[in-house]
Image (tube, rainbow, N blue to C red):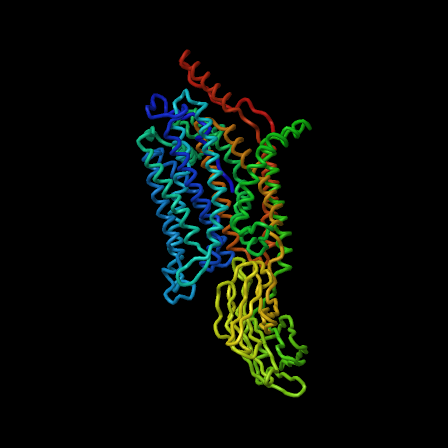
Amino acid sequence: MSVYVPSSWLLINEKNKGHSNHGPSIFGYPLSIFFIVINEFCERFSYYGMRAVLVIYFKFFLSWDDNLSTAIYHTFVALCYLTPILGALVADSWLGKFKTIISLSIVYTVGQAVLSIGSINDLMDGDRDGTPDNLQIPVALSMIGLVLIAFGTGGIKPCVAAFGGDQFEEHQEKQRSRFFSIFYLSINAGSLLSTIITPMLRGVECGIHVKQKCYPLAFGVPAILMAIALLVFVVGSRMYKKVEPQGNIMVQVASCITFAIGNRFRHRSKQFPKREHWLDWAREKYDKRLILQTKMVLKVLFLYIPLPMFWALFDQQGSRWTLQATTMDGDFGLVQIQPDQMQTVNPILIVIMVPIVDAVVYPLIQKCHINFTPLRKMTVGMLLAALAFVVAAVVQVQIDRTLPIFPEAGTSQVRVINLGNDKVTANFYPDGRSVDLSSLTWTEYLNFETAKLNSTNNVVITNGSETLNKAYPFDGKERHTLIITNRGRLQSQLLFDGITEKPEQGDNKIRFINNLDVPINISMGGTDFPYVSFFSATNYTNFQRGKKSITIHTDSYNCTTRSLPFGYGSAYTIIVEGCEGNELKLRYVEDIQANTVSMAWQIPQYFLMTCGEVVFSVTGLSFSYSQAPANMKSVLQAGWLLTVAVGNIIVLIIAGASKLEEQWTEYVLFAALLLVVTVIFAIMAYFYTYVDPAEVEAQLVEEENRKREKGLPLPEYGSTAQTKM
């Protein structure tokens, strides 16, 4: 999770001059800013809370595969970082900050509400089978909601902090600085709390007809928080100082660049003398101050070209890394962690690492007489992000070793369970394979070519005294369980498991086989399986982790016991054998192993990524602002947000086009791409020369004063006060 510092935080708003704020104050601060801080806390809770569970929602509620879930997630994030440019233009050139915040907050709130409604399964589940009758309806509602949210959150992003800064007078610089610190704290508090709480809400079981993960609650609470944010902001409206829109510098810069390119094209003939810089072709329309400032900005923006690759890796914490966590064990002893809660590691580490890096690491490097320039820090940050993905690949390899192997196209898997008292032999024809089983034993899943199983009398079972010929239909890409017993007579039954992947969301799939001579009623963890006859099985049913109370009821007795502790993502066939006193006797057949790789193994990759963020993101913003004129910082902020958007677009392109079957290879691919880009960035940084904008600005002022005094034309301006990296 990355929190971006708006450029307006670092500026004294020149437009405030001449305006006086007569609103109420408390402790020397305008009372209006407290409404703004509360608004920001609620909005960040709403955004990050919704985003924390989004990829899980795509995969398990909308039933999208990992690649589509990842692609749509990053499309949404990219849109969230493209729309701030639009929001800044609307606020500065048309509506003003206050009206822009109000208008887009309404859009934002509606979007959250639409997304929440789209996740209510009971509204669209007419047959009450636990899934929407028409999946296109929740998909359409979800997409509409996300587009509205993207325009809302992105549009207000550049406005709220700047609007807060507008509330202060020129002599309140100290209070303004403290306000931005409090504002930054509210952002982190809202995002951290939401990424802890919202996954917990998602994990709650809810529903009128069918109990399932409570996405309406997980999305509904952020929607309510956004409504509260809007309400709080409106309540304080009478206290705000509202500065009228006075144009946006980004429009001027874009116009200057466009005119320079067009003018150069019109004068491309050799008869026109060359100019020192291509932007000098804007001289006919724009003053030299704007041209020089635009040159300085473009010099920094050129360095931004390799940066999207960092964000392509960084923002996968909310997609690929969250999906990776769904196949891991969230048992941390006293605490059970949901897969989407692992994202909280990043903001927690940010709070810890930022002061450590600033107060300990950087001073130590300085004492070692190492010239650790900002661009070198950013290079190290990119290398750390690449290393984080290498670690993620290693973790993925360990996970893959624990995953079950499911049948591929043209093959079938069969497990044989002997429920009888005698030894049996099962022969499969025309494959020719046979298995021998003692009483109450079973095989692992055996792989067969489906075509070689589907023939007349394809299974022959014998126990020495009896022989049973069966012609069972085996399906391709499916698992089957063949149960055999000799109680009363030799008989068999083929069960279709219907499991082709690990149980979703860490649930455990449990089914029962009745090996008693009488029908029984089974209860487990509040779920009833009525009238299970002898030698029959229930369907698989989802249960959450932990021990469960299991009770069987017959016409003559009841038996109860506690199950073994189920983990995350397992599947079991439980054989009911009988009762000894009041104690129930059970046998557990593990169909799918529980997740055994702990989510704690993700902490190293989060640690490396967070360290990379600290030295890359924070340093990058600071460097950018130090290299641009004061009135151009909003242009650099727009460029910085654009690198985040492009990074997410890179992910969705690779996720959509990648033919890699193994997830660990994709992690290695991203790490390799970032490594190559880092080398390119390091070369660009080596040839970059640092500029002191204040000194350049002073030179401009001095030259302009000289012109006014002597009536001389303003001379050509070159770069000054430069130092080599």
Q: Quadrant of residue 314?
A: top right
Comparing 695 with 608, the one in front is 608
Viewer can see residue 512: yes
Kindly identify the residue that appears in the image at 48 percent across and 33 percent down: 298
Kindly identify the residue that appears in the image at 63 percent across and 83 percent down: 461
Comparing 406 with 382, the one in front is 406
Q: Is residue 314 above or below residue 70?
A: above
Q: Position of residue 21 (x, y in %)?
A: 34, 24
How many marks do you count on the picture? 0
Q: Position of residue 563 (x, y in %)?
A: 58, 64
Q: Quadrant of residue 481?
A: bottom right
Q: Is residue 36 above or below residue 135?
A: above
Q: Position of residue 513 (x, y in %)?
A: 56, 73
Q: Quadrant of the C terminus?
A: top right
Q: Residue furthest top?
A: 709
- Report the side of 183 relative to 563 (left or right): left
Q: Position of residue 222 (x, y in %)?
A: 41, 46
- Report the side of 340 relative to 285 (left or right): right
Viewer can see residue 499: no
Comparing 267 with 365, the one in front is 365
Q: Quadrant of residue 460?
A: bottom right
Q: Is residue 133 above or below residue 421?
A: above
